[in-house]
């Protein structure tokens, strides 16, 4: 018991053993912030066109000065590296090792409004090449296992479902007028168009989740990019299951596959953060100085 004349001197938070109140839990230590664990804010889906427009406005309105010089450098940088920046900001890896389809030409028979099924075919070809990339980068001991993922011989990946979102719509059908109405309501003046001949596309894949040893289902996302328009034409969301053809049932990924896919996912996220930070610096370099 605390003597009555000392009660006013006792701080329950500092002396819980005297007051009889339980001590509060210790505060969790603040995480150490480093370049590796800082997650930059996400970018607008229109950041590339917006940044170009902003740079062009700086050049046309200000004439000369350090901001104008920065704007010219930004435009040149975007012209040379738009694909790496656009894809990297969403976590896609670019380069010969990772690109599923590079500069795939749109056929003459696809001109006009590309048949919707063609987008799925583009994604399918990209997915197979993406998997072959793991085989080519693997050692001889595991190379054949990667190649068999696209065959019904042993353990393979089976496409369970695919959902496609068309980001470029036709100017000549009802879906365009619907999209235009929605865009008008949102005060957006963009008039999207479908893929046309002549055009070349780049198709990339990325892992949606980080696999583990119990993974029986692989979620992937594909992006189909128009090189002519330098924008996303479609996105495909794929669900694949790991299947053992010999046993006729689902199974888990092999341990070495889990390790390779985990490394790939981590590389995706690292590239996303690095690219996003780079884009934010480009935006800042041409922003008007604060008053």
Image (cartoon, grey):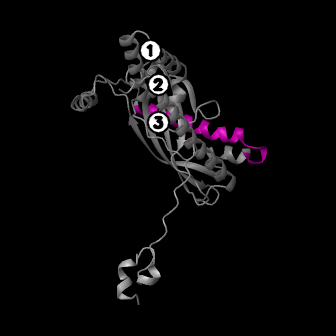
Q: Which mark is residue 68?
A: 1
Residue 187 vs residue 246: left or right? left
Q: Does residue 112 show up magenta in the picture?
A: no
Mark 1 or 2 closer to N-term? 1
Q: Residues within 10 Å of mark 2 (few under 14, many from 20)?
A: some
Q: Residues within 10 Å of mark 3 (few under 14, many from 20)?
A: some
Residue reaching furthest right?
140
Q: Which mark is residue 120?
A: 3
Most foreground residue, 147 or 200: 200
Q: Over which residues does the magenta segment extend?
A: 116-142
Contact (Cβ within 8 Å) of mark 1 with mark 2: no
Spatial CA span between label 2 and label 3: 39 Å
Image location of residue 115, percent across then percent down: 40, 29
Assign the magenta stretch its main secondary structure: helix
Q: Residue, x 47% and y 24% (percent of image)?
A: 285
Q: Does residue 126 show up magenta in the picture?
A: yes
Quarter containing the C terminus: top left
Q: Residues within 10 Å of mark 1 (few under 14, many from 20)?
A: many
Spatial CA span between label 1 and label 3: 43 Å
Which residue in the protein does label 2 denote?
Answer: 285
Image location of residue 260, percent across then percent down: 66, 48
Q: Residue, x 50% and y 21% (percent of image)?
A: 78
Contact (Cβ within 8 Å) of mark 1 with mark 3: no
Spatial CA span between label 1 and label 2: 10 Å
SS at mark 2 in the image: helix
Residue reaching furthest front?
5
Mark 1 or 3 closer to N-term? 1
Residue reaching furthest bottom?
1
SS at mark 3 in the image: helix
């Amino acid at each position: 018991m605390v003597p009555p004349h000392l009660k006013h001197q006792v701080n329950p938070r500092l002396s819980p053993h005297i007051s009889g109140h339980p001590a509060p839990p210790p505060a969790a230590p603040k995480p150490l912030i480093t370049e590796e664990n800082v997650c930059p804010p996400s970018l607008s889906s229109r950041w590339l066109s917006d940044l170009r427009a902003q740079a062009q406005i700086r050049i046309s309105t200000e004439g000369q000065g350090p901001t104008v010089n920065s704007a010219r450098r930004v435009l040149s940088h975007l012209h040379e590296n738009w694909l790496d920046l656009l894809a990297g900001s969403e976590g896609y890896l670019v380069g010969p090792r990772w690109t599923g389809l590079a500069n795939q030409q749109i056929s003459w028979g696809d001109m006009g409004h590309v048949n919707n099924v063609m987008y799925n075919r583009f994604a399918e070809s990209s997915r197979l090449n993406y998997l072959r990339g793991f085989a080519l980068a693997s050692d001889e001991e595991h190379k054949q296992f990667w190649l068999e993922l696209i065959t019904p011989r042993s353990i393979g990946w089976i496409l369970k479902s695919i959902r496609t979102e068309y980001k470029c719509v036709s100017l000549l059908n009802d879906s365009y007028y619907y999209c235009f109405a929605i865009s008008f309501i949102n005060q957006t003046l963009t008039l999207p168009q479908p893929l046309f001949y002549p055009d070349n596309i780049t198709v990339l894949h990325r892992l949606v989740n980080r696999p583990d040893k119990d993974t029986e289902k692989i979620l992937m996302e594909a992006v189909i990019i128009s090189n002519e328009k330098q924008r996303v034409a479609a996105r495909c969301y794929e669900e694949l299951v790991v299947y053992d053809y010999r046993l006729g049932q689902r199974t888990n990924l092999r341990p070495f596959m889990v390790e390779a896919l985990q490394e790939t996912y981590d590389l995706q996220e690292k590239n996303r953060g690095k690219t996003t930070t780079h884009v934010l610096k480009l935006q800042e370099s041409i922003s008007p100085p604060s008053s």
